[in-house]
Image (cartoon, rainbow, N blue to C red):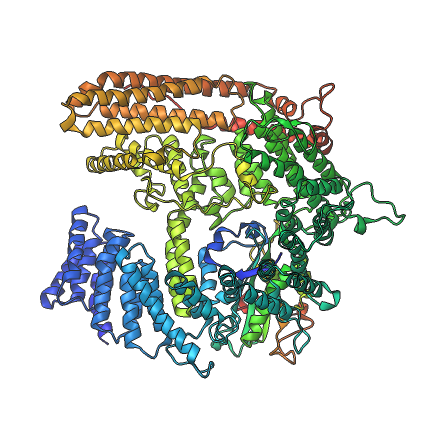
Amino acid sequence: MADQLRASQDAPIWNAIEANNFKQALKLVDKRLAKRHTEYLEALKIYIRSRSPQVPEKNAVLLHLEELPERKPPVADIEAIELYDEALEEVLPKSGETWERIIGPLRWQCVKAQPKNEDLSLKCFQACLSKGALDHARQIANSLEKNFPKNHSYIFWNITMMYLFSTSQNCPENQKRIWGGLALGQIGKLAGVTKEAQDQKQLPIRSVQTPQELLLLDRITAAYGKPEVRLEYLQSTQLGPESIVAKGEWQLWRTKLQLMETAQKWQELFDTTAALLKRARTKDDSSQLSESQLSDWIVWEASIRSAVELGSHQYKSQVQAEIEAHLDPASGVDKSWRRNASLAEVKLLFDSSTAFSRLQLSSEEGNGTSKRVAAIVKYLRGYGKASTAYNDLRPFVERLSPTERKQLLESLKNNNVFLDVQKLGDGKYPAKQDHSTAGQITQVINAYKLRYLLSCALPEYGRTQSPAKGLVEGNCNSCSWPCGLVCKHCLEDIAREAIQSYRIAMDDDGKISQTLLKTDQHPADDLSILAAMCFIKLSLMSAEKETEPLARASATYALQATVLLESAWLHSKHNFQMSLLLIRLYKYLGCGSLAMRAYHRLSLKQIQLDTLTYTIFDRFSSLDVRASNQTSAISSKERTPLGHLQEQQDLYLSSYEKITKNSWLSFKHGSYNSIFEMREVSEKLSNSIAAAMSVIESRKISRLTEPGTPLTEISHGFDLLPPNMEFPESTFSDNLDYESFPNFETSIGPRFEQLSRYIPSLSAYRCRLNLAAEKLMLIIDPSADVAQEKELLHLWLKQYLDSQKQSEPARAKPEGMTRSEELAAATYHAVALILRASREQDQWAETDFQTKLNKYNTDLLESLEEHLALIKALKEPVPAFGNTLHALYTAHEVGRTILHFCKYVSKQGKGFVEKQKEATAKIEELARKLLQLVVENCGVVKKGLDEGGWIDKVLECTLPEAQEGGDDRAAMGALRELLDENFLEEWAGEVVESWREAVVGLSYLKTPPKA
Amino acid sequence: MTSLRPFHATDIFKFNPTNLDPLTETYDLNFYFSYLARWPHLFNVAEGLDGTIDGYIMGKLESSPSYYVNSEHYLPFHAHITALTVAPHARRLGLARTLSSTLENSGDEYDAWFVDLFVRKSNKVGQALYKGLGYKVFRVVKEYYVDDLSDDTKDGEDAWDMRKRLKRDVSGIHARDDGENYVVRPEDVW
C-alpha cells in the first residue's frame, strides 16, 4: 500500500525524468522535499542531478555521494540506496573501486540495520558480488549465516566469501591469512561433523553434505591447510570419493590419486588403483559394466607409476594381468576403455624397461625387433585407424634409442607395419599403401606422421638442443645427405610422398568423398597438411639472397604450401587447421584479403574472438587497411577488419556482467567450485592480451582511415583495458589458442605454431610499448586541444618513464618485435624523454640540461636514420609481401608521429623551444624524408602491380620448371601432378588480385603538407 | 587414451578443437556458465594425452514447469543432453558413448525417467551414433533449427527428439517405437 502510494506520488517526477526534463523533475522533487524530508526523496534528487549532462553538476553529485558512507545514522531505505547506485553509474560508469568505497558500505550498513530482512540481505549480497565488492559481500554473507541459522547454504556462502576475499587483490596482505584461515577452520569443523555423524543420510545442518561442498573443502585445504590433511579427508569413508556425500564425484578420485602420488604412498596407491581397475571390468547385477569409468587413463598411469616405484616384478605382473583382463574380448569393456588398457601395455613396457632392468632381457640385443618397437607397432595395428594413435604413441617413440628409432623408421618406410591386417590373399605383402577406406587412409597418415617425427621433428629438436646450435653442419642421420638444423631432403621426401599418397586417396572416383557430409573433414586431409607443414619449414629455412620477392626459394615453398592447402580445402571446407595455416601464409605473402577469406572460413564467434583473432588481426594495421563499413545490417563476411575488432571488443564489454550474473547463480545452486573458476575467467578476460591487441590495431587503423578525427575521440575500446597496462609490472593474460594449429612436432619441443612464425608473435612486451605509444600520440595530437587532459597525460608520462627506469633489465629483452617495431620503439622512447624534458622547466637553466637534451635528440635522429636505411633497403618491393607492407606502414606511422611531435614541441615554453629548435628542424627533415621514401615505395608497388604478367610470375614461382639434373626428390613434381591447371591459374589470379587490393590501403600513406 | 574430468570454466579458452567444427555451436559465456552453475556434475570433458579437449558433454536434469503438467507435451523429470561433441581428430574411438554414459549414470542416480536430446535431421552420423547407444526417435520437431547446414538455400531444419529409457521407466511409458511419425512444432517443445 505504501509502495503504491509512493509510486502514484512519484509518477509526475518520473514522467519528467523520462522526458529528460530534469529541471521540471527537480522542481517537483524539491516541492515534495519541502513538505516532508525523506531519504528516498533526497536520493531521488541526487539521481535527477546525476542525469544532467553538465559536468559541474555531475561533479557535485559525486561529492555528495562521497559523503554518504559517513552519514549518521546511515541510510536505511534500500530504494534510496538503489537510486544512489544508479546515480553513481550515471556520473562514473563502471567505477568498481568508487562503487566499493561508496555504495558497498551503504548496502552493508543497510543490511546491518535490518539483519532479519532476508530479501534485503540477498539483494545487497548480489549487488556487492556483481560489483566485486567482496569484503562487503563477505560481511553480508556472515550476517545471513548468523541471522538465518537453519539455512544450510548460508554457512557455505560465508565460507566461500571469506576464502574468495582472501584470494582477491582487494584483500590487504595482512588479512589474507586471517580470512583464509577462518574459512579453513570453519569448513574443517563442518567436515569433522560429517565425519563423526552416525547417519550419513541424516546429517545436521552444520556439516558438509554435497559434492560441491567437498570440492570447496578440498580447495580451501589446498590453499591454507596441509597436504596430509587434504589426503586424510579424501581417504575417509565419509568425505572421500566413495562417500555418500560425494555422489560419485569423479574429481575427488582424480585429486585423491594425485595426492597419494605426491605423498609417495606407493603401496596404497597400487592397491587403490588395482581395486579400481578390477571394479571397472566387473559387471553389476544387471550384467552391466556400470563402473567402467574407473579405468580412466589417470588410474592406469597411477597404477603403473606405483608398480614401477615399488620395484618388485610381482607388481608389474599384476598390472600386466589387469591389462590382459581388460583386453579379453569376453570382458565386454568398451573400446575407449580398451584403448586405455592397450596404451597402458605400451607404457608399462617403456616405464619398466628401466625400473625392472635387472629382471628384463635387454630389448635391443638379439636379432629381432626391439620389444619396445614391437609394442609400438602392436598399438599402431590396433588403433592406427584413429587419428589419435599418433598423439598416443608420440611420447613413447621419443623415448626410443637411436637403433630402435631406425628399426621403426625402416618398418614404416617399408610399409610393413600394418602387415597382418593388410596381408593379401596370395600371401604376398602389399607393395603399396591401401587407401580404400577412411580407416586405412588414417593408418597411412599415422605412419607418415611417425616418419616425420623420426626423420624430421626429433632430429631437428636434437640439433637445436646441441651446444653448437646454429652451427650444425653434417650429414643427416635419416637420409645421409648434408644438412643443417633442418634437413631439406627429409622434408622434401616426406612432402613428396605425402602429396603422392594424398593424390591416391583423393583419386577414388568419389568412393569416400561421396559418403561424407558437407560438414565433414576428408580423412586424407592430414596428408596435405603434413606436406604443407614441410613446405612451410622449407620456406622458413631458405636463405633470402635474391632481392626480388618471387625469385626467393622461401616464396616458392610458401606458395606451394598455400596452393596445396587451397586445393585440399575444396574437398574439406570445414578443416579449420587448413584455414589457420592459410591465414598465416597469406599474411606472409602480403595477401590481406585472402587471409581474411581464410579467417571467415573459421566462422569464429563469442569466446573464440578472444582466443583466435590474433591469428589474423595482430599487425593487421600494417598489412591491409580499409575504411570501416560498419553498419548493423552487415554480415560477418562483409565486415571490415575494424568491424571485426569492434565485435571482439563487444565481447569483453559484455563478459563481466555475464560472469557475475552466473556467479550469483552458482551461489544459489551451491556450485561453489564454479564461482572460483568463473572468477579466473573474468580476470583472464580483463587482462587479455588479445583485448590489448584489438584496441591497438583498431586505433592504428582508425588513425589512417579517419585522419581528421581527434585521437581522443577514437576510443575503440581503449577504456576496456585496465588502467596502466603499459607499465612494466602489469601482467597480460595469454588466452591465445596455439593448440588448434596442426602439430606433429615432438611433445618435448616447440609446437609447429611456434616453429612456423614468419614474424614474431604477439607479446606482452610489444603490447605495453604500443599502448604507451598510443598515449604519447595523444599528447602530441594536433587535432585535440584538451589542455586538462594533456596535463594528466604529462603526469602519466613522468610516471611511465620512471617505471621504465626501475625495470631496466626487463627492457633489455625485447620480445615479439620486428626490426621496424624496434626502431619505432626507440624513436618513441626518445620522443617521450624530450617531452618530459619540455616540462622540466626548473631544469632548463641547468648546465647539463642541454647535454641531456642533445643526447635524446641524437638518439631520436639515429633511430630515424636507421629507419630510413631500412626502407631504402626495400629495393625490389613488388609484389609487396607482408614484411614489406609492415615496414612501410610502420615507417609511415613513425614519420607522421614525429611531424606531430615537432609541431607540438615548437609550441612549448619559449626557453625550451630555443634549446630544441635546431634539433627539431633536423628531426622534421628526417621524418619528411622517411615519409617521402615510404610514399615513393608505395608508388613503386602500385606501379609494379599495374603491369601485366603477374599471374604467370606467380605460377612460375610456385612450380618452377625443373632444371636438368635437378633434385628428383623434390616435392614439386608431386604437387604438379596433383593440381588441376585451371584451379592453379584461378588461384594465382586471386593472389595477384589480393596484392592489388592491398595497394588500396597504401593510398592512406601520405606525407602531410608543410605547415 | 581416454580420461574424463569435469569441465572447468577456463576450458572455454581451450575448446576450439571441438568448437571449430561446424556442427558444434559456440554459445555466449552465459550459456556455458549457467550450466556450470546449475549442473556442474553433468558437464564433463574427455581429454587427450597432452590435455587437448577431445570432446565434452553438457547436460541438465529437469522437468517441464508444473503449469504444463496437463499438456500432452509435458516432460517428466529427465536428463537432457544439451551438447555432446567430439573433436574431428578424436572420432571413432567410442568417446561419444563414454561421455553419454556418464550422463545416463547421473540420470539413474537422480532417478530420472529418460535421457533425451535433439539432433539435426541431416546429421545422419549423429543419428546412427545415438541409435547405436540405444536412443530412439520420440518425435520430430518441425524446423526446430533456424538454419540448415546441409542446404544453404533452406531457412530451417527439422530436429529429431531422441530418447533413451533409464532404469526408472521399467515399462517404457515414456518411449515410442514409431517416433518418426509424431510431428510437433517448436513451440510445443519446452
Instruction: Tell me: A561 left or right of B8.
Output: right
Q: Is residue A926 above or below residue A563?
A: above
Q: Nearer the viewer, residue A72 or A567?
A: A72
Residue A573: give x, y in percent of width and height.
63, 44
The outermost residue toward the front is: A358
Instruction: Tell me: A124 left or right of A914.
Output: right
Instruction: Tell me: B9 left or right of A921.
Output: right
Q: Is residue A342 above or below residue A59?
A: below
Total labels: the figure holds 0
Residue A853: give x, y in percent of width and height.
23, 22
Residue A157 visible? The answer is yes
Instruction: Tell me: A17 left or right of A332.
Output: left
Residue A790: give x, y in percent of width and height.
22, 35
Q: Nearer the viewer, residue A247 or A848?
A: A848
Residue B101 visible? The answer is no
Q: Is residue A197 above or below residue A856?
A: below
Q: Is residue A527 above or below residue A352?
A: above
Residue A1010: give x, y in percent of width and height.
30, 18
Q: Nearer the viewer, residue A198 or A784?
A: A198
Q: Nearer the viewer, residue A648 or A209?
A: A209
